[in-house]
Amino acid sequence: MGKIRNDIILIIVLAALIVSSFIWWFLSSVDEPNRLYVNIYYDEKLLYSTPLDENNEYVVKGKIGDVHIVIEDGYVSVVEADCPNHICVEEGKKNKNNDTITCLPNLVYVKIGGHIDV
Protein backbone atom coordinates (compact mmCIF):
# COMPACT_ATOMS: atom_id res chain seq x y z
CA MET A 1 0.00 0.00 0.00
CA GLY A 2 2.80 2.44 0.86
CA LYS A 3 4.54 1.91 -2.46
CA ILE A 4 1.40 2.74 -4.47
CA ARG A 5 0.82 5.86 -2.35
CA ASN A 6 4.39 7.06 -3.01
CA ASP A 7 3.93 6.44 -6.76
CA ILE A 8 0.73 8.51 -6.77
CA ILE A 9 2.45 11.37 -4.92
CA LEU A 10 5.34 11.25 -7.40
CA ILE A 11 2.94 11.36 -10.37
CA ILE A 12 1.07 14.33 -8.85
CA VAL A 13 4.32 16.24 -8.22
CA LEU A 14 5.59 15.58 -11.76
CA ALA A 15 2.24 16.60 -13.26
CA ALA A 16 2.28 19.83 -11.22
CA LEU A 17 5.82 20.59 -12.43
CA ILE A 18 4.85 19.98 -16.06
CA VAL A 19 1.72 22.13 -15.79
CA SER A 20 3.55 24.98 -14.03
CA SER A 21 6.36 24.84 -16.62
CA PHE A 22 3.84 25.04 -19.43
CA ILE A 23 2.05 28.01 -17.79
CA TRP A 24 5.37 29.84 -17.29
CA TRP A 25 6.40 29.22 -20.91
CA PHE A 26 3.01 30.31 -22.25
CA LEU A 27 2.92 33.53 -20.21
CA SER A 28 6.49 34.50 -21.10
CA SER A 29 6.00 33.83 -24.81
CA VAL A 30 2.69 35.71 -25.02
CA ASP A 31 4.14 38.91 -23.54
CA GLU A 32 7.10 39.36 -25.90
CA PRO A 33 5.39 39.38 -29.33
CA ASN A 34 3.04 42.17 -28.22
CA ARG A 35 5.87 44.37 -26.95
CA LEU A 36 6.69 47.24 -29.26
CA TYR A 37 10.23 48.38 -29.95
CA VAL A 38 11.71 51.58 -31.32
CA ASN A 39 14.10 50.79 -34.16
CA ILE A 40 16.45 53.66 -35.05
CA TYR A 41 18.22 53.69 -38.40
CA TYR A 42 20.89 55.78 -40.07
CA ASP A 43 21.34 55.42 -43.83
CA GLU A 44 19.26 52.19 -43.77
CA LYS A 45 21.51 50.62 -41.09
CA LEU A 46 19.88 49.66 -37.79
CA LEU A 47 21.62 51.39 -34.90
CA TYR A 48 19.31 50.71 -31.93
CA SER A 49 16.32 48.51 -31.10
CA THR A 50 14.91 49.40 -27.70
CA PRO A 51 11.54 48.79 -25.99
CA LEU A 52 8.97 51.54 -26.41
CA ASP A 53 7.94 51.14 -22.77
CA GLU A 54 11.41 51.97 -21.41
CA ASN A 55 12.41 55.64 -21.20
CA ASN A 56 15.57 56.43 -23.13
CA GLU A 57 17.34 59.09 -25.18
CA TYR A 58 19.57 58.84 -28.23
CA VAL A 59 21.56 61.33 -30.25
CA VAL A 60 22.20 60.02 -33.75
CA LYS A 61 24.86 61.63 -35.91
CA GLY A 62 23.13 62.21 -39.23
CA LYS A 63 24.43 63.27 -42.61
CA ILE A 64 24.28 67.00 -41.83
CA GLY A 65 23.98 67.03 -38.03
CA ASP A 66 22.57 65.46 -34.89
CA VAL A 67 19.08 64.07 -34.38
CA HIS A 68 17.91 63.90 -30.74
CA ILE A 69 15.37 61.08 -30.17
CA VAL A 70 13.46 60.67 -26.90
CA ILE A 71 11.48 57.63 -25.76
CA GLU A 72 9.29 58.56 -22.82
CA ASP A 73 6.08 57.22 -21.27
CA GLY A 74 5.41 54.84 -24.18
CA TYR A 75 5.97 57.44 -26.93
CA VAL A 76 8.90 58.24 -29.20
CA SER A 77 9.65 61.63 -30.71
CA VAL A 78 12.39 63.65 -32.32
CA VAL A 79 12.82 66.64 -30.04
CA GLU A 80 15.67 68.37 -31.87
CA ALA A 81 17.38 67.96 -35.22
CA ASP A 82 20.05 69.77 -37.21
CA CYS A 83 18.08 70.03 -40.43
CA PRO A 84 16.62 72.94 -42.39
CA ASN A 85 12.87 72.29 -42.13
CA HIS A 86 12.39 70.33 -38.84
CA ILE A 87 9.52 68.23 -40.21
CA CYS A 88 10.75 65.34 -38.06
CA VAL A 89 10.34 67.44 -34.91
CA GLU A 90 6.87 68.58 -36.00
CA GLU A 91 5.78 64.94 -36.40
CA GLY A 92 5.26 64.85 -32.63
CA LYS A 93 4.98 61.78 -30.44
CA LYS A 94 4.33 58.33 -31.91
CA ASN A 95 3.31 55.09 -30.20
CA LYS A 96 1.57 52.80 -32.72
CA ASN A 97 2.98 49.78 -34.51
CA ASN A 98 4.54 50.75 -37.89
CA ASP A 99 4.57 54.48 -37.02
CA THR A 100 7.64 56.22 -38.44
CA ILE A 101 9.47 59.49 -38.00
CA THR A 102 11.93 60.47 -40.73
CA CYS A 103 14.62 63.14 -40.85
CA LEU A 104 15.33 62.93 -44.54
CA PRO A 105 18.22 65.44 -44.69
CA ASN A 106 20.06 63.46 -41.99
CA LEU A 107 19.14 60.00 -43.38
CA VAL A 108 17.75 59.07 -39.94
CA TYR A 109 14.45 57.33 -39.41
CA VAL A 110 12.63 55.80 -36.49
CA LYS A 111 10.14 52.95 -36.84
CA ILE A 112 8.00 51.32 -34.17
CA GLY A 113 7.66 47.57 -34.54
CA GLY A 114 9.08 44.29 -33.32
CA HIS A 115 12.52 43.73 -31.85
CA ILE A 116 15.40 43.46 -34.31
CA ASP A 117 18.85 42.27 -33.27
CA VAL A 118 21.45 44.96 -33.83
Image (spheres, grey):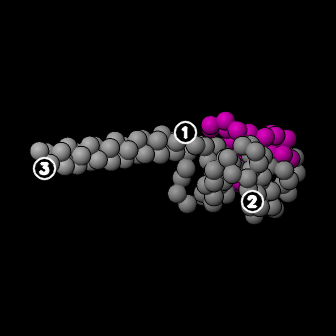
Q: Which residue: 81% across, 62% down?
A: 65
- How far, Cα to Cα, is label 3 from label 2? 64 Å
Residue 68 screen position, x and y as percent: 80, 56
Q: Is 61 situated above or below 21?
A: below
Q: Nearer the viewer, residue 24 or 62?
A: 24
Q: Which residue: 63% across, 60% down?
A: 47
Marks 1 and 3, the one that precedes in the sequence: 3
23 with respect to 116 (left or right): left
Label 3: state its secondary structure: helix
Residue hosting label 2:
58
Q: Nearer the viewer, mark 1 or mark 2?
A: 1
- How far, Cα to Cα, is label 1 from label 3? 48 Å
Answer yes or no: do the residues labelled 3 and 2 have beta carbons within 8 Å?
Answer: no
Q: Nearer the viewer, residue 40 or 87?
A: 40
Please tell me whether residue 98 belongs to the stretch shown in magenta. yes
Marks 1 and 2, the one that precedes in the sequence: 1
- How far, Cα to Cα, is label 1 from label 2? 23 Å
Residue 59 screen position, x and y as percent: 77, 61
Residue 92 screen position, x and y as percent: 82, 40
Residue hosting label 3:
3
Bin the neighbour count of mark 1 within 10 Å (Cα to Cα): few under 14, some 14-19, many 20 and up: few
100 with respect to 66 (left or right): left
Q: Nearer the viewer, residue 22 or 60?
A: 22
Residue 84 screen position, x and y as percent: 88, 51
Q: Amino acid at mark 3?
A: Lys
Give, as a single range, the part of the protein colored magenta.
86-108
Q: Nearer the viewer, mark 3 or mark 2?
A: 3
Residue hosting label 1:
34
Q: Nearer the viewer, mark 1 or mark 3?
A: 3
Label 1: state its secondary structure: loop
Q: Which residue: 63% across, 50% down?
A: 51
